Amino acid sequence: MRAVGKLIDGKAVAATVRAEVAQRVATFTRVAGRAPGLHVILAGEDPGSVVYVRNKEKAAKEVGMVGEVHRLPDSVTEADLLALVEALNQDSSVDGILVQFPVPKQIHQAEVLRTIHPDKDVDGLHAVNVGRLWSGDEGLVPCTPRGILRLIAEARVPLKGARAVVVGRSNLVGKPVAALLLAEHATVTLAHSRTVDLRERCREADILVAAVGRAKMIPGDWVKSGACVIDVGMNRDGAGKLCGDVDFASVEPVAGAITPVPGGVGPMTIAMLLENTLRAAESRTNARGQGRG
Ligand code: NDP
């Protein structure tokens, strides 16, 4: 049990995941004769992206993977960026390819996602992986949603038959979280900006996942007593302090389990990226360590 009282400690769970990955990386490296490789493409110098990419590279190296960043100028053409993705698709030492978003305006995000080989798509955003997720096939699943399911599991919150409400329907978070909860036999409501009576929908939830991007929009009286509340939001409050979509002060006394911001969902994202890269490496490489392209 990773929860300290009702608080779900994402930092501690993420550390456990990283340790598990490091062990499996050591085994993979011994058998395959090479370490799993995560390649990140960063186009431009968006300050947030520069930090995220540095953290991903560092995390990959810490678990024994090859972590390589391909830095491209802000002016890079779409053709050049896609050519790099294609070269990485063909390189058998590359297991995971991630293009850091947002990309410069001349590059179409959809085109980038289409070009990454689905078996190397460690962000799990390629349409093939989306289809695999919804049809229950093995595939790569977006990192933050997988991290959320791991946190719920660590908190020992039962999902079978439970009522889950996900607020936010993005391809990155809301929709894949809903698919994963459904696969665990929860009854899922996917709410969004056009949802009528959002407060009432939220109050029905045994598991409430907030992935909106609006500081403290969910107060305590929107939450059922004893509910498990997962706060994905990363916002700044009026004082510039990092906060979630949930008003922690009023929700925490009502909830049965809750993730803090920071220190909840956030740390899980990179941990699950490492796990996805390892899974990609394992499924692309046969027992004799012979990789496929
Ligand atoms: P998007 O902006 O892509 O999606 C936001 C969703 O919230 C949309 O579906 C939108 O509805 C819905 N929404 C907006 N306003 C309301 C409202 N008033 N009531 C109900 N629903 C509303 O965001 P993301 O999914 O990418 O991210 C959500 C949050 O999670 C952000 O704060 C982001 O920073 C954070 N995040 C955190 C991560 C982490 O590692 N911790 C990783 C990824 C994201 P509609 O579709 O109708 O417009």
Image (tube, rainbow, N blue to C red):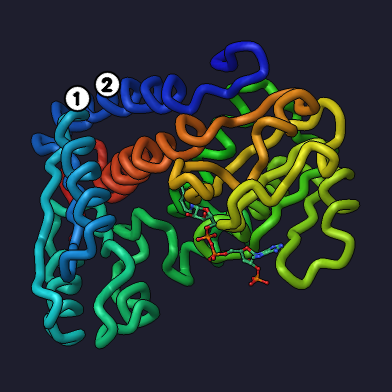
Secondary structure beneath label 2: helix
Q: Residue at x 31, y 39 (%)?
A: 274
Q: Is residue 67 left or right of residue 158?
A: left
Q: Tell me if the residue at label 1 has its CB under 8 Å from ligand 1.
A: no
Where is residue 218? Give x, y as percent.
Answer: 72, 47
Q: Is residue 3 depicted above or below 104 in this figure?
A: above
Q: Quadrant of residue 131?
A: bottom right
Q: Which mark is residue 23?
A: 2
Q: Is residue 52 left or right of residue 266?
A: left
**On-image quarter of the C terminus:** bottom left
Secondary structure beneath label 1: helix
Where is residue 156? Give x, y as percent.
Answer: 67, 21
**On-image quarter of the N terminus:** top right
Distance in Å between CA atoms under marks 1 and 2: 5 Å
Q: Nearer the viewer, residue 271 or 134?
A: 271
Please give the residue where the numbered disc 1 appears in the rendered image.
26
Where is residue 288? Give x, y as percent.
Answer: 18, 37
Where is residue 144? Give x, y as percent.
Answer: 48, 46
Mark 1–mark 2 CB contact (< 8 Å): yes
